């Protein structure tokens, strides 16, 4: 199979108009259009991964590879017409179209000009309505091109696309990209780049007429083709969708070919799945138990709902009208008042994120409930999977596509289908009777009043609990004398700091005294942690289901952990109060979310 694919990869052709292309594989045709300075061969990772399922055609756009030059002052239509002529030459009535950067603009132009020839489009790292400073920099670079080559400019381009210096794991991808830049026709590059510099708003008024399904996908670290741009385009396109790949930059199709290609294939494959929609709709792609626990982070709490506006700007409002709707498919809802200033933006959004706030985010709640002009000025955030802003430090975040908008009295109900989520064990911010509340036991009060208390923690991360293994093979939870501080080596916080464990303590889980001696008191919290970079200090990460097999010396701690495992499975937690022999578990409310429907606060 590898030899056959290598042979298929080597198949190159030339259309009657001089257009050069690569053709491989068999199946539904997919046309790939590269970006400025590249050529058809840049798609080799995708061809190798897709040729067993699709007929893959990669074109050398005008002025690139072996294709002829574009006109001196080209338009997007010139490049789109080139692609249509190639489809005609190959006898293809209809194809999927995947474009990168400049190629993404051409793919959009092709679908807008000839929708009958296109099944779906994928716009990778596309530009849209560049902000003024970025637009000026791009046009300055375009004006400096002379058509005689620009080695220094190519070096700067690689730095923008991969980093300066280039990370070791990206050097091969950077070298492949640099090689393509070195071979491009300088005049073809100059003519095309000048068009690219001014075409970022070419489709601003036309995307609303895009008649085919469209995926706008970019990397979270792509500053020139930002997540906000992709989210804004997806918002305008009637059948648009945005996907953001965490940590990726402009050349993600080369730098992360497996991940990028998987998203492309999944999107193109949805055409085949339409007839099997019932099966497709129940495939969430994530663990339902974790999803239920994430929903459980909301305890009559406060959320900030976010999206990207029509100009690519982040928008948000505070709400406590949040609830889960369905686990299969995964649906949640939130309400926004018709009178809210953000209502027109959210009522027309294609996606939004619901951020469940922690107890330290009271100030953010107030800002987003106000009429402040720039609510995001003091809020750290990153783009979620849909491009919607996800606030750093939230107890939980649900990144959603808009499933349905329902009008209900003086509010609109936004029903979202969850595409991605995250959660931790920090304490949520509550709201009751017009005031904020914090439902957890105050750790600061504990530290101040009972410094001699034995304080420990059950710290969880992605279904694993953090233990410390002793020299004789026993396992202990992290604990210390009092909560203390990072500088107090005998305290819990001092122990965690000494072992470089970043932990977040959440709810109280157990309090007991020794039966034979009323002192000391033992206090254990539930919490979360960030995975340490090294396990050289006796740190062990144990799956929850394997905890009961561990050697644990303290019978009381062993009994407590048995209860913890059981309550994790049942998704219903309580607080034990008593001594090491007997006591009672005072149950908390089951962690499923109750509907509040109290509207929004801003």
Image (cartoon, rainbow, N blue to C red):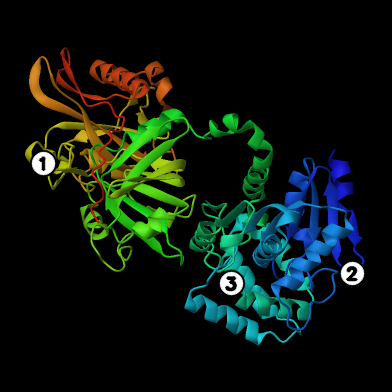
Tell me the CA gap for discs 3 and 1.
56 Å
Residue under the point 40% across and 16% down: 549
| Whole-percent x, y for residue 496 in the image | 29, 41
The N terminus: image quadrant: top right
Q: Quadrant of residue 117?
A: bottom right
- Considering the numbered disc 3 on the image, is that residue within a helix, a strand or a loop? loop
- Considering the numbered disc 1 on the image, is that residue within a helix, a strand or a loop? helix
Residue under the point 74% across and 76% down: 189
| Whole-percent x, y for residue 475 in the image | 35, 24
| Whole-percent x, y for residue 347 in the image | 40, 54
Q: Check contact, mark 2 vs mark 3: CB within 8 A.
A: no
Residue that label 1 marks? 445
Residue that label 2 marks? 17
Q: Is residue 67 visible?
A: yes
User: Of residues 56 and 249, which is closer to you in this image?
Assistant: 56
Residue under the point 58% across and 63% down: 207
């Amino acid at each position: 199979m590898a030899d056959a694919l290598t042979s298929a990869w080597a198949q190159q052709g030339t259309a009657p108009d001089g257009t050069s292309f690569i053709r491989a594989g068999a199946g539904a045709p997919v046309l790939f259009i590269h970006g400025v300075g590249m050529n058809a061969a840049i798609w080799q990772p995708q061809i190798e991964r897709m040729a067993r399922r699709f007929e893959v055609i990669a074109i050398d756009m005008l002025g690139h590879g072996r294709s002829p030059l574009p006109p001196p002052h080209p338009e997007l239509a010139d490049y789109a017409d080139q692609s249509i002529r190639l489809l005609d030459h190959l006898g293809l009535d209809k194809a999927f179209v995947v474009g990168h950067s400049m190629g993404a603009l051409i793919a959009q132009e092709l679908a807008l000009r000839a929708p009958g020839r296109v099944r779906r489009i994928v716009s990778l790292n596309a530009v849209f309505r560049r902000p003024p400073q970025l637009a000026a920099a791009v046009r300055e670079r375009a004006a400096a091109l002379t058509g005689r080559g620009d080695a220094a400019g190519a070096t700067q381009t690689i730095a923008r696309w991969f980093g300066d210096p280039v990370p070791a794991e990206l050097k091969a991808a950077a070298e492949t990209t640099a090689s393509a830049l070195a071979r491009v026709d300088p005049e073809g590059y100059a003519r095309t780049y000048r068009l690219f510099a001014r075409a970022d708003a070419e489709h601003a008024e036309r995307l609303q007429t895009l008649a085919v399904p469209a995926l706008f996908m970019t990397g979270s670290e792509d500053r020139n083709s930002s997540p906000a741009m992709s989210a804004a385009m997806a918002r305008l396109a009637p059948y648009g969708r945005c996907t953001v790949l965490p940590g990726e930059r402009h050349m993600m199709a080369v730098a992360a070919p497996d991940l990028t290609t998987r998203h492309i294939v999944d999107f193109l494959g949805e055409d085949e799945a339409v007839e099997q929609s019932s099966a497709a709709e129940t495939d969430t792609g994530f663990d339902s138990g974790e999803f239920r626990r994430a929903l459980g982070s909301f305890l009559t709490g406060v959320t900030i709902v976010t999206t990207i506006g029509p100009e690519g700007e982040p928008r948000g409002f505070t709400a406590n009208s949040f609830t889960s709707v369905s686990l299969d498919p995964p649906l949640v809802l939130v309400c926004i008042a018709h009178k809210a200033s953000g209502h027109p933006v959210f009522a027309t959004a294609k996606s939004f994120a619901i951020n469940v706030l922690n107890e330290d985010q009271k100030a953010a709640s107030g800002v987003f409930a106000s009429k402040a002009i720039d609510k995001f000025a003091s809020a750290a955030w990153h783009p979620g999977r849909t491009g919607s802003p996800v606030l750093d430090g939230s107890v939980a975040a649900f990144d959603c596509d808009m499933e349905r908008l329902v009008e209900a009295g003086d509010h609109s109900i936004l029903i979202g289908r969850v595409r991605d989520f995250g959660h931790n064990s920090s304490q949520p911010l509550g709201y009751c009777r017009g005031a904020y509340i914090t439902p957890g036991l105050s750790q600061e009060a504990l530290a101040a009043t009972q410094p001699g208390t034995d304080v420990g923690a059950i710290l969880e991360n992605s279904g694993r609990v953090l233990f410390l293994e002793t020299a004789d093979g026993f396992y202990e939870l992290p604990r210390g004398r009092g909560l203390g501080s990072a500088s107090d080596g005998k305290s819990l916080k001092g122990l965690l700091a000494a072992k470089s464990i970043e932990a977040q303590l959440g709810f109280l889980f157990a309090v007991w005294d020794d039966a034979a001696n009323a002192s000391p008191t033992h206090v254990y919290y539930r919490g979360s942690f960030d995975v340490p970079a090294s396990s050289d200090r006796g740190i062990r990460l144990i799956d929850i289901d394997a905890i009961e097999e561990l050697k644990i010396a303290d019978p009381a701690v062993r009994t407590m952990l048995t209860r913890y495992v059981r309550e994790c499975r049942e998704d219903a937690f309580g607080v034990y109060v008593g001594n090491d022999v007997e006591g009672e578990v005072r149950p908390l409310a089951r962690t499923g979310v109750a509907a509040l429907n109290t509207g929004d606060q801003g």
